[in-house]
Amino acid sequence: MSLETRLLTALAPWRHAPAWQVAFSGGLDSTVLLYLLARLARREALPPLCALHVHHGLQPAADAWPAHCQKVCDELGIPLKVLRVTVDAGPSLERAAREARYTAFMGELGRGEVLLSAQHRDDQAETLLFRLLRGAGVRGLAGMPASRPLGQGSLVRPLLTVSRAELEAFARAEGLAWVEDPSNADTDLARNFLRHVILPALQARWPRVAESLARSAAHMAEADALLNELARADLDAARGHCDFPWLSLPSLELALLACLTPARQRNALRCWLAALTSLPDSDHWAGWENLRDAAADAIPIWRLARGEVHRADGRLWWLSGAWLETPAANLVWADAGEPLDLPGNGRLEILGTPPAGRLEVRYRQGGEVLEVSGRGRRDLKRLLNESHLPAFVRGRLPLLVVDGELLAVANLPDLDGTRQGGWRLHWTPPTNDQGLSW
């Protein structure tokens, strides 16, 4: 089967995308991909094509690559956009460059559009070997997926079943020109060491090693998909009923997770946390065990890269963004007819006719007393305990004070002002999103 036919088959699910954008470095792999797509476009109804070249500015040789890419694109009749990025120095220059590159790509992808990248079977073998040496689990050993979401669109790798030798043979037969990145020869870089030293040695003994490693990655991808199905079923069961629907935070019932085997617990939590934070490595799962096994009256916290998991009243809660900050001090509510934005703590409003007097919004400090219809004056601490409101919410729950007297507690039935007559104190808590307050 020709390369054209294999490429067209791999891209069949995305034939009706609004546009195809090609990650075009000017190297061998992306040059062959762009050339094949340009040739296919002459006889097939394909989405509009364009090329994206990311200029990292990391080495002098790279300054000439945009001009080379422009020449190739002009000859093929494909528009080119050069994206210049700044790579932050850090412990891994390769990782920082990759993150900068994909951030730039995400900024260019419109809704439903596809970014085509030219990684091939040898790249997949390198990825599997590299991750194996780092002790990756099933998900990591699945290698690079053939497709995944990226920004508003998708990243697609249609050449993962094609070897580098096939690409080079095609390029030479067609007389294609490409650039060589000098850094690719630097064996001080881990991937280059695998590519130039380890894999050739393995191939000398096992000629089909790249194919075998890529096949193992495919098996791992299938296993990962099955584990994800199991995790989703466990998570659906653990979401259960929350007594505070206005508290729109990710949460799970602890008891339903705790009855699973430890491996199944970790599998479900990986799936739950994947969209929320960087996943912990093996050594940091002790934080989950400490949280799970803490005494019933404890308030354990599992701190992760982008937030925290709290345990409260039999549920796990994910907190990040504004939820990890202390809300601002007391506020005077000058116009209670309008909603009040609470710095770092969402929005407050009075539904109905506001009570007369000087209105303030405060937060619990201790010792507060509230007049409860039919029960007389009661300590707020006791009332909150009776409500089973999660502990992490209590310190930021808005209290309405009128002329110096605590009159209502937001969102709690019978305490939110409804028994005062004609109004109710309603709080929209902050979201978990960084930079958003409500």
Image: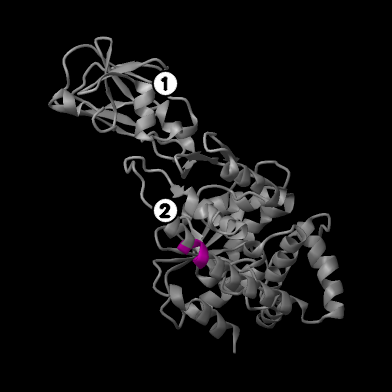
Looking at the picture, which amino acid does disc 1 mark? Answer: Ala
Task: In the displayed orientation, state which residue is furthest to the bottom.
Answer: 1
Q: Which residues are magenta?
A: 229-233
Quarter that holds the C terminus: top left
- For the point 77% across and 81% down, which residue is it? 208
Q: Is residue 399 magenta?
A: no
- Left or right of 116 on screen, residue 413: left
Q: Is residue 230 magenta?
A: yes
- For the point 34% across and 33% down, which residue is it? 387
- For the point 83% across and 54% down, which residue is it? 188
Name the foreground residue: 290 vs 274.
Answer: 290
Q: Which residue is mark 1?
A: 328
Which of discs 2 and 1 lies nearer the camera? The answer is 2
Looking at the picture, which amino acid does disc 2 mark? Answer: Arg
How packed mark 1 is, by other alpha carbons closer than 10 Å (few <14, some 14-19, many 20 or more), is few
Residue 142, placed above or below residue 308: below
At which x and y percent is residue 309? 53, 42
Name the foreground residue: 217 vs 375.
Answer: 375
Magenta segment main secondary structure: helix
Name the foreground residue: 155 vs 41.
Answer: 155
- Left or right of 220 on screen, residue 319: left
Q: Which residue is mark 2?
A: 239
Mark 2–mark 1 CB contact (< 8 Å): no
- For the point 37% across and 28% down, which residue is it? 384
Quadrant assignment, res 187: bottom right
